[in-house]
Amino acid sequence: MLLGWRSRNSCPKWLVIGTYENVDVSLHTKREGAAKLEVVPALLHQWLSLGIDGFMFLDIEKLVSEDGLLNSMHQWRNVLDSYHRGHLDRIMMVPVGFLEKMREFEFPHLDRLITIVDLIDAPLDMSGIEKLPERIQSVVAWDAHQSFPWINWHVATLAAGHSSPGAQHYSSIGATIFLLTLPGTVSVHYGDEINLHGPKQGKVEPHNWTSIMQWTDQKFAGFSTTDPWKSLSPGWDFNNVYNHNHTIEPVRQMIKLRQEKVPIYVNGIFNYEGDYHPTKSTNYKMRIARDGLVVLDRFYPRRHQYAVISNLSPQLLDADISHLYYGGAVAVSSHDKEGYLIFKNVTLAPGEGLLCILDK
């Protein structure tokens, strides 16, 4: 599947542009797979001319055995670059699974291929908490050089049509706050922060908290000059567009911090000494990932250190993390915590997450 998006007010709008199996825009069929790669440039031109800012090449790992894939991707890159305007690049995003499969196939030009890409989409399965450190480390390894693409994280439990009942705690606001602390960039899917469930038997059940998100303070939430949500099914709460959703506010605060605080928006520490090609080291540390509790900190030389603490379990947690830090000032909280927090005894509700500025 090929997805495109437009970024307005820092909130991307995704469009489904085509699928690999569709005859008109196919990238892969049994008889003429390689030939179908040639269809993509025209598709890109069509949507780029309409103002699309970038494309996600979903399921492109299906094409790893196709001859000419690398040359085709270079061609797609050239099309995207031809629409470059000022400092605004047109983005190419591929799933991390595609790169992992290319490495598994021992693709000889992987170092060239990775420089074509701008973003690597990486799902995190929040239900396997103990495996999070290893998974994050393996994904971040793809961004080991300043010229390599950034990582784009999202919650894996919501990747296929939103969450299932078993994922209700893993897709909580605490998981979203944790995700927004990781190095790279983040896709917050609609409903992640409130555990929105997908449609049942082809029907969307209306709830009084579902409507377009209030991402900005502008009229109509910055989405339009009219009321695009009025065409939604009866029973949906239109007033949510004009009022702050309580669960949205900490997400907005996290996004603001990501834009302003160096330890969070910088995705590594670079050493430029004696070389035109600086070395890069990570600026995060996964401290705890067990029994539903995740603790991760972000740091940068001569800057405040930040720690995210989230409860991804369905139970109330009483945690002592004073062996890591004494305490810190609450910067963002999903459950209205504020002031200075001593980490000797931290109580976290199910799905709760918070970000603290640590003592120097």
Image (cartoon, rainbow, N blue to C red):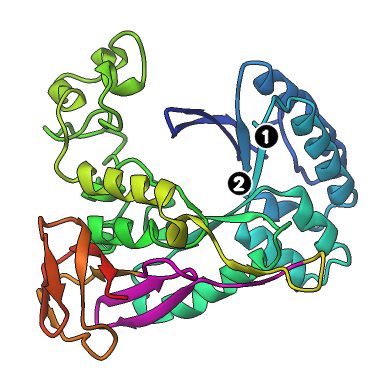
Percent of width and height locating residue 46: 70, 19
Residue occupying image coordinates x 67% and y 68%: 144
Residue occupying image coordinates x 41% and y 54%: 261
What's the magenta region? 278-305
Distance (Cα) linking label 2 and label 1:
20 Å
Residue 315 visible, this angle: no
The secondary structure type at the circle numbered 1 is loop
Using the image, determine if residue 136 lies above or below residue 169: below
Determine if the magenta segment contains residue 66. no
Residue 198, quarter of picture = top left
Tell me which numbered mark, 2 or 1, is placed earlier along the sequence. Answer: 2
| Quadrant housing the C terminus | bottom left
Using the image, determine if residue 316 lies above or below residue 332: below
Which residue is label 2 attached to?
Answer: 58
Residue occupying image coordinates x 51% and y 71%: 283
Percent of width and height locating residue 17: 59, 29
Crowd band around label 1 with a 10 angstrom C-alpha radius: few (<14), some (14–19), many (20+): some
Determine if the magenta segment contains residue 286. yes
Which residue is label 1 attached to?
Answer: 89
| Quadrant housing the N terminus | top right
The amino acid type, in three-letter code, at marker 1 is: Asp
Percent of width and height locating residue 179: 38, 59
